Image (tube, coloured by chain):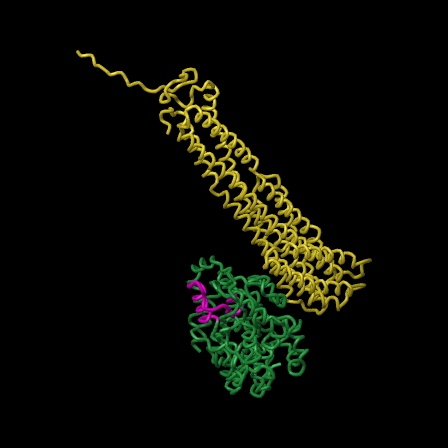
Chain colours: A yellow, B green
């Protein structure tokens, strides 16, 4: 029997620990990066472990932050931002319905025949309002993980219920009016009150909640990503410091893997910081250039719709209110401010054109509103009714659609900004993940290198 | 003032509608082309040249032959003097074949053949819905504020962001009192057996069906398929019984003038022109109401002449210029201030301003119904059914 003879394994370079690290002047080819034998081997060894851990932690924070940025950007783009705009459209539709219903009602009182165009406008506007409510509900009503959700749900429910009550009251008033039954005016007044007292405040609350959600989404994940960036820079500093010390020790030889790991980490930080900054800038631009103008338009809408509603109230009153023009004057002043703001904040030729058109159409409606206001009472004036349902409704629709045009331009600017914010972070987490893994792996390999492997 | 006879237009807004059998083709098979609409044109162009496709004789005309749209002092000549050359072609024949041609050109090549086309409102709505239209360059159309608000609330283009109405008209009843022997006041008068074979029905489905729906007590501004089918049944019965002498477009004017028809569904502007020679021909808005429509300026997607289109639109929306066009075409102007401008001019112009057909008052407006539209499948089915009636006549 022959005893097999095995050759002893060739000597392998040992992975050195600090206590095993040879002291100078050990040949450079046998030195591992981690030991280095610089007289500070314990510190370097600790960094050998610490740096990959730091990279892992940075990567984890960055990737999670990236996914959060991506998720909130999608939510903002798909639901919150559209909802912010649609809420304004919804309010515009309700106001248009309100104005048309009042005009149709008064036309029966004035001539015995219902003004069909006004009635059709009312029906179309009410249908649109219900459709918009459905869209808004689909956009933000079902997102249930934020503090604003309960407020939004409640507002949506209130608006839905109020729209039903409103439509019922308008129909009741119409039937009574056409059949010359008592109480028709009271029922229409009740309908107008639903818009003023229920729908208007709910829309305002909904807008506020949606805006809060927008702001919340804009800020979400920023802290986490900021931490990742901070930690990343600390890690980067450590890596540079280690390489600097190694370069001093081994006379400018380069650990390729550590250098590549450093580059990967720089890339990681650049991608993360760029994503965060571009997203934030885009959302800020969307807000400053788009949504703030949308808000100004919404205030303008509110004042104009309130004015039209107030004129309707005046014409329905049997006795002239004590000072009917006080509220009218106040609403006109608010709308004047709104127009001035919209014109001032227009930041493109197209927006300026839309703002100028709004200014002209508002001027026409303003003049008619003052006419109606001055003509109405002590009891319903036939002349005032004629102006209200003719030129009044026409110019109201003119200013209403002009506001919509302003909204349309700003909405484009707003949605473009939100879309840009989304695209800035759409692939961010995946790039982060890839670069973090790359940096980690390269650093581990780099720290396993012997100086002899250096170039 | 042009010094030309008011309403001097010998032909009509619409000519013979060829190929009604192609009804609905404009909408069919083009849905897949909507992706082309994703391309947007931001270059407004230099604003010096414009290619416009319009209905026949639908702009102020004059000159030695009285039908030259480039006559000195007219819209096109004035614009040319101001540096905007308009290649104006009166070849939009109808909303079926004519429209299909526009759309084929709008969605297939990079640059459409026309920079402004003037389809009827329901076709314009289709263009906008399918993204075949450019947004208007409103930054160079300050007169956009002169659009009558009645045209701003259409659900398919609120605020007129994609189209600016060109002219509006009414489809009512025209008749020769000498031949009818009595005033006609109702759509149902067209079904009087005494006029069998000498009644004209209009070739546009939405207008004929709309009028018949009104006769049936239905509202064409909020149509249902059942109500439209019932109206079509009535029209088919009238055609089958020999009551309908002809389905016509603008030819009703010649046929009325010649006495071949005693009464017809008719376009208000064409009747106004006919009345220059035959003032006895009477146009009425039936007691049930009449159908209103409007043709509207649309910029096909891909046009490279947005600035020129904007300049043109701005010019024709100046009330002074719009009033001159109204004098010639005798249709309802969608431009605010035209009535006041005509009154300011006095004379025959002021007489036009008093017309409730050209400037409907509130009472008249309440009797006008714009076709409300059904879903595209229903509209297509109705188009095909009506086209079969027209072709079979």
In the image, B76 versus A78, the foreground residue is B76
Q: Tell me the residue at 66%/49% (across/down).
A: A204
Q: In this rendering, would A451 be left or right of A360?
A: left
Q: Tell me the residue at 50%/46% (across/down).
A: A423
In the image, A348 versus A320, the foreground residue is A348
Residue B105 spot, x, y in % from top left:
43, 66
Viewer can see residue B218: no
Viewer can see residue A418: yes
Q: In this rendering, would A373 be left or right of B254?
A: right
In the image, B351 versus A103, the foreground residue is B351
In the figure, residue A25 lies in which quadrant? top left
Q: In this rendering, would A230 be left or right of A443?
A: right
Residue B381 spot, x, y in % from top left:
46, 66
Q: Quadrant of the N terminus of chain B?
A: bottom right
Instruction: Answer whether residue B37 is magenta in the image.
Output: no
Question: Which residue sits furthest right?
Answer: A322
Residue A172 spot, x, y in % from top left:
68, 58
Q: Tell me the residue at 36%/26% (across/down).
A: A453
In the figure, residue B371 lies in which quadrant? bottom right
Q: Quadrant of the C terminus of chain B?
A: bottom left
In the image, B49 versus A291, the foreground residue is B49
In the figure, residue B274 lies in which quadrant? bottom right
Instruction: Answer whether residue B101 is magenta in the image.
Output: yes
Question: Which residue sits furthest left?
Answer: A1
Q: Is residue A161 above or below residue A225?
A: below
Part of the protein shown in magenta: B95-124
Q: How many marks?
A: 0
Residue A401 spot, x, y in % from top left:
62, 60
Q: Is residue A22 above or below residue B276?
A: above
Q: Is residue B239 above or below residue B371?
A: below
């Amino acid at each position: 029997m022959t005893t097999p003879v095995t050759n002893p394994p060739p000597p392998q370079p040992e992975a050195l620990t600090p206590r095993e690290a040879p002291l100078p002047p050990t040949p450079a080819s046998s030195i591992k990066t981690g030991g280095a034998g610089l007289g500070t081997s314990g510190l370097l060894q600790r960094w050998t472990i610490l740096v990959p851990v730091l990279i892992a932690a940075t990567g984890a924070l960055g990737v999670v932050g990236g996914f959060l940025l991506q998720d909130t950007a999608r939510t903002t783009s798909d639901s919150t931002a559209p909802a912010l705009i649609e809420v304004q459209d919804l309010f515009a539709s309700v106001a248009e319905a309100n104005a048309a219903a009042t005009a149709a009602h008064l036309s029966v009182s004035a001539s015995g025949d219902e003004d069909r165009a006004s009635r059709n406008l009312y029906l179309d506007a009410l249908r649109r309002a219900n459709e918009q409510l459905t869209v808004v509900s689909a956009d933000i009503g079902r997102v249930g993980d934020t503090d604003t959700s309960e407020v939004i749900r409640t507002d949506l429910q209130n608006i839905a219920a109020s729209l039903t009550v409103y439509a019922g009251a308008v129909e009741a008033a119409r039937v009574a009016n056409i059949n010359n039954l008592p109480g028709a005016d009271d029922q229409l007044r009740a309908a107008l009150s639903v818009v003023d007292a229920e729908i208007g405040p709910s829309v305002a609350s909904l807008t506020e909640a949606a805006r809060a959600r927008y702001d919340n989404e804009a800020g979400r994940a920023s802290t986490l990503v900021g931490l990742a960036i901070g930690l990343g820079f600390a890690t980067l500093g450590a890596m540079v410091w280690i390489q600097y010390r190694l370069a001093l020790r081994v006379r400018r030889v380069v650990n390729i893997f550590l250098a590549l790991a450093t580059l990967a980490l720089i890339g990681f930080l650049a991608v993360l910081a760029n994503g965060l900054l571009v997203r934030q800038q885009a959302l800020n631009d969307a807000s400053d250039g788009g949504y703030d103008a949308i808000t100004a338009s919404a205030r303008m809408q509110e004042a104009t719709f309130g004015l039209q509603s107030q004129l309707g109230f005046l014409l329905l009153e049997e006795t002239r209110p004590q000072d009917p023009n006080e509220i009218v004057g106040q609403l006109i002043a608010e709308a004047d401010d709104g127009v001035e703001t919209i014109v001032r904040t227009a930041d493109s030729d197209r927006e300026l054109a839309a703002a100028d058109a709004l200014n002209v159409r508002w001027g026409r409606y303003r003049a008619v509103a003052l006419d109606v206001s001055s003509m109405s009472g002590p009891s319903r004036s036939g002349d005032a009714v004629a102006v209200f349902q003719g030129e009044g409704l026409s110019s109201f629709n003119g200013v209403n659609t002009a506001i919509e045009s302003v909204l349309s331009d700003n909405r484009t600017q707003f949605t473009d900004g939100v879309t840009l914010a989304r695209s800035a972070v759409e692939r961010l987490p995946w790039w982060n993940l890839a670069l973090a893994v790359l940096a980690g792996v390269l650093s581990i390999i780099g720290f396993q290198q012997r100086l002899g492997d250096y170039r | 003032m042009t010094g030309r006879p008011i309403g001097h237009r010998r032909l009509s807004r619409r000519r013979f509608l060829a190929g009604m059998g192609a009804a609905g083709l404009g909408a069919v098979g083009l849905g897949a082309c909507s992706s082309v609409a994703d391309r947007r044109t931001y270059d407004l162009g230099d604003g010096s040249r414009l290619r416009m496709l319009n209905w026949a004789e639908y702009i102020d005309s004059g000159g030695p032959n009285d039908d030259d749209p480039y006559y000195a002092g007219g819209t096109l000549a004035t614009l040319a003097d101001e540096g905007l050359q308009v290649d104006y072609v009166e070849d939009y024949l109808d909303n079926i074949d004519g429209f299909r041609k526009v759309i084929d050109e709008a969605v297939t090549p990079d640059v459409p053949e026309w920079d402004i086309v003037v389809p009827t409102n329901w076709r314009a709505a289709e263009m906008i819905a399918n993204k075949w239209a450019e947004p208007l360059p409103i930054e160079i159309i300050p007169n956009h504020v002169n659009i009558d608000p009645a045209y701003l609330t259409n659900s398919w283009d609120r605020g007129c962001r994609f189209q600016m109405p060109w002219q509006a008209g009414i489809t009512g009843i025209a008749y020769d009192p000498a031949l009818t022997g009595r005033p006609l006041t109702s759509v149902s008068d067209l079904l009087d057996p005494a006029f069998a074979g000498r009644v004209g029905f209009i070739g546009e489905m939405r207008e004929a069906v709309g009028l018949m729906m009104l006769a049936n007590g239905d509202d064409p501004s909020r149509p249902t398929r059942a109500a439209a089918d019932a109206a079509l049944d009535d029209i088919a019965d009238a055609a089958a019984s020999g009551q309908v002498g002809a389905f016509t477009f603008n030819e009703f004017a010649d046929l009325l003038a010649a006495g071949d028809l005693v009464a017809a569904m008719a376009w208000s502007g064409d009747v106004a022109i006919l009345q220059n020679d035959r003032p006895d021909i009477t146009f009425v808005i039936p007691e049930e109401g009449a159908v209103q429509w409007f043709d509207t300026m649309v910029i096909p997607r891909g046009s490279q002449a947005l600035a020129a289109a904007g300049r043109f639109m701005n010019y024709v929306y100046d009330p002074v210029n719009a009033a001159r066009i109204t004098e010639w075409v005798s249709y309802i102007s969608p431009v605010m201030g035209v009535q006041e401008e005509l009154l300011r001019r006095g004379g025959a112009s002021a007489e036009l301003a008093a017309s409730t057909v050209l400037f409907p008052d509130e009472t008249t407006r309440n009797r006008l119904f714009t076709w409300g539209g059904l879903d595209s499948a229903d509209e297509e089915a109705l188009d095909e059914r009506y086209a079969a009636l027209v072709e079979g006549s």
